Image (cartoon, helix red, strand yellow):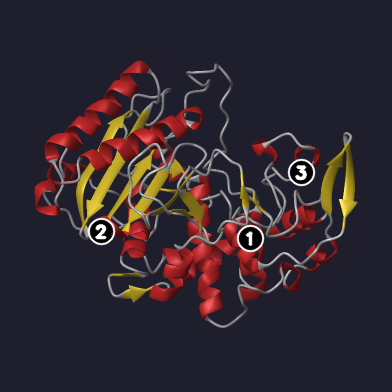
C-alpha cells in the first residue's frame, strides 16, 4: 500500500499526519515495499500475529504506511492506521528525552547521584551470590542519572533472569500498577543491586526511576510533565498512560495464547488508569503519534518549528556510552551495538545478523512494537503489533525487508 492509498485511512484527526510522498521520490522501491507487506500478510495468514502496522519514512516524508490483518483476534475489525497499541519499553526513549530536557534546563547533571533526588538509594547494597546465598556488599560508588539512562545502574527486571536478586524482585509488589511512582522507587531502592553501578549493562527498571526523578524535580506527575513538554508540542494526542472508553473499538490485542509456545498471554488493560505511571513501559500510542516522535529525533530534536531537545544533547544520547569496560551479556543487545542514553546504538556495519547503518539508534517494546532512526539514510521506521513471543523474530524481519527497499 502506498502513502496515497494510506490517506484513505487517516489517523485520528487530533494527531496531524506527517507529509506523504511516492516511495520512488524518496529513494524507496514501491515494489519491494509491497513485497514487505506481502511477507507480513503471510505471517498473519500463518497465525504468527493477529495484525500489524508498518511505516517507512525518508527525507521528511512517509513513503509507506500499511495496516495489515486484524486489531484483535477476538473481533472482526481490521487493523487500522489509528489503532492504539501498548508500546511498553518504547516509553523509555520518551522519558529519557524528558530527563535530558531537565538537564538542559539546568536542574541537575548526568553525573549527579540518584540519591540526590530519591534518598532511599543512598544506602543500597550489591547482592553477590555465594553458594546459593546472597551476600550484601557496599557500593564502590553511587549510582548516577547517567547509569539509569544507559542501564548500568545495577537495577534489574525480574523477567530477564532467575538470579537471587531477580527472585526478590518477583516476590515484591514491583509489577503492581496500583502503587505510586514514589512507592515503586522506594521499593526498588530497598532491594539489592545486581552488580556495582557502571560495571554491567542490565536491562532494568532504571527508566521507571528516571520517571520518578522527573516528578521530584518538576513537581508534576510524570504524565503531566510528558504531556506539557513533549507530547503536546509534538501533537501526540493519542499517547498517554491509558485511553478512554470511547476508543474501545481501536485497541490492538494479542492472541490469548502464544501461537508458538501455547503459553497464556496477558497484557495490561489500556482502558484502566494506573496509579503507577511507568516511565519504563506504561504508555499507549498510535503509529502516527510515535512517527512524529521519530521525525523529531531524525530532525535533530525539532519538529514543525518546535525544538524539543538540543541537537548536541540528542547527539550525546545517540552515542555509545558503554565502551569496552562495561560487561554486556544480553540477547537484547545485538552484536555490533552499544547503548546510549535511552537508545541502543549501532556501532559496526557488520557483526549484527541484520542490515542497518553505523549511528542508527532504536528501541522496542515487549509486546512487539519497534522503531529505529537512521540518520545516515535520513530514514525512520515504525512497526506496531501485539505479539510478545514473536517480537525478536519480527524485529529482524522488519529490518531485512525495509532495508531491501532502500535504493
Q: Mark 1, residues whose alpha carbon is within 10 Å: few (<14), some, or many (≥20)? A: many
Mark 2 or mark 3, which has the lower sequence index?
Answer: 3
Give how far apart the Cα atoms at labels 2 and 3 are. 43 Å
Q: Which quadrant of the view contains residue 402?
A: top left
The outermost residue toward the bottom is: 106
Q: Residue at x 53, y 20 (%)?
A: 257
Q: Is residue 253 visible in this depiction of the protein?
A: no
Q: Mark 2, residues whose alpha carbon is within 10 Å: few (<14), some, or many (≥20)? A: some
Q: Residue at x 52, y 48 (%)?
A: 89
Across and down, in percent, residue 251 comes to 42, 38
Task: From the image, tell me which residue sits under label 2.
Answer: 378
Across and down, in percent, residue 134 comes to 88, 42
* Relative to 321, 25 lies left or right: left
Q: Residue at x 64, y 67 (%)?
A: 145
Viewer-nearest of discs 3 and 1? 1
Element on which disc 2 rests: loop
Viewer-nearest of discs 2 and 3? 2
Labelled pair 3, 1 in contact (Cβ < 8 Å):
no
Q: Which quadrant of the view contains residue 72?
A: top left
* Relative to 63, 291 lies left or right: right
Mark 3 or mark 1, which has the lower sequence index?
Answer: 1
Task: From the image, tell me which residue sits under label 1.
Answer: 148
Q: Is residue 165 above or below residue 362?
A: above
Q: Quadrant of the N terminus?
A: top left
Residue sitting nearer the eye, 227 or 127 = 127
Amino acid at each position: 500500500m502506498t502513502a496515497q492509498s494510506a490517506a484513505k485511512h487517516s489517523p485520528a484527526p487530533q494527531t496531524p499526519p506527517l507529509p506523504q510522498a511516492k516511495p520512488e521520490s524518496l529513494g524507496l522501491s514501491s515494489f519491494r515495499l509491497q513485497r514487505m507487506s506481502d511477507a507480513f500478510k503471510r505471517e498473519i495468514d500463518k497465525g504468527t500475529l493477529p495484525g500489524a502496522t508498518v511505516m517507512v519514512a525518508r527525507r521528511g516524508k512517509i513513503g509507506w504506511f500499511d495496516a495489515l490483518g486484524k486489531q484483535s483476534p477476538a473481533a472482526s475489525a481490521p487493523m487500522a492506521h489509528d489503532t492504539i497499541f501498548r508500546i511498553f519499553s518504547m516509553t523509555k526513549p520518551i522519558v529519557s528525552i524528558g530527563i535530558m530536557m531537565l538537564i538542559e534546563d539546568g536542574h541537575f547533571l548526568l553525573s549527579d547521584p540518584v540519591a540526590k533526588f530519591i534518598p532511599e538509594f543512598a544506602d543500597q547494597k550489591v547482592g553477590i551470590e555465594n553458594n546459593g546465598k546472597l551476600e550484601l556488599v557496599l557500593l564502590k560508588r553511587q549510582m548516577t542519572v547517567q547509569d539509569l539512562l544507559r542501564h548500568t545502574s545495577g537495577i534489574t527486571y525480574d523477567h530477564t533472569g532467575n538470579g537471587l536478586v531477580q527472585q526478590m524482585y518477583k516476590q515484591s509488589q514491583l509489577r503492581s500498577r496500583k502503587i505510586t511512582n514514589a512507592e515503586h522507587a522506594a521499593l526498588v531502592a530497598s532491594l539489592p543491586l545486581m552488580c556495582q553501578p557502571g560495571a554491567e549493562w542490565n536491562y532494568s527498571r532504571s527508566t521507571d526511576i528516571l520517571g520518578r526523578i522527573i516528578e521530584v524535580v518538576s513537581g508534576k506527575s510524570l504524565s503531566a510533565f510528558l504531556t506539557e513538554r513533549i507530547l503536546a508540542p509534538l501533537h501526540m494526542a493519542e499517547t498517554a498512560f491509558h485511553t478512554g472508553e470511547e476508543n474501545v473499538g481501536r485497541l490492538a490485542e494479542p492472541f490469548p495464547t502464544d501461537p508458538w509456545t501455547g503459553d497464556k498471554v496477558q497484557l495490561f488493560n489500556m482502558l484502566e488508569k494506573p496509579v503507577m505511571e511507568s516511565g519504563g513501559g506504561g504508555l499507549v500510542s498510535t503509529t502516527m503519534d510515535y512517527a512524529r516522535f521519530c521525525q523529531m529525533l531524525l530532525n535533530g530534536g525539532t519538529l514543525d518549528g518546535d525544538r524539543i531537545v538540543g541537537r548536541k544533547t540528542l547527539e550525546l544520547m545517540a552515542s555509545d556510552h558503554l565502551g569496552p569496560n562495561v560487561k554486556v551479556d544480553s540477547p537484547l543487545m545485538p552484536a555490533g551495538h552499544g547503548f546510549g542514553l535511552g537508545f541502543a546504538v549501532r556501532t559496526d556495519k557488520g557483526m549484527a545478523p541484520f542490515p542497518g547503518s553505523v549511528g542508527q539508534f532504536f528501541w522496542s517494546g515487549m509486546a512487539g512494537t519497534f522503531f529505529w532512526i537512521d540518520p545516515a539514510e535520513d530514514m525512520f521506521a515504525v512497526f506496531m503489533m501485539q505479539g510478545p513471543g514473536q517480537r525478536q523474530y519480527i524485529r529482524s524481519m522488519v529490518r531485512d525487508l525495509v532495508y531491501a527497499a532502500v535504493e
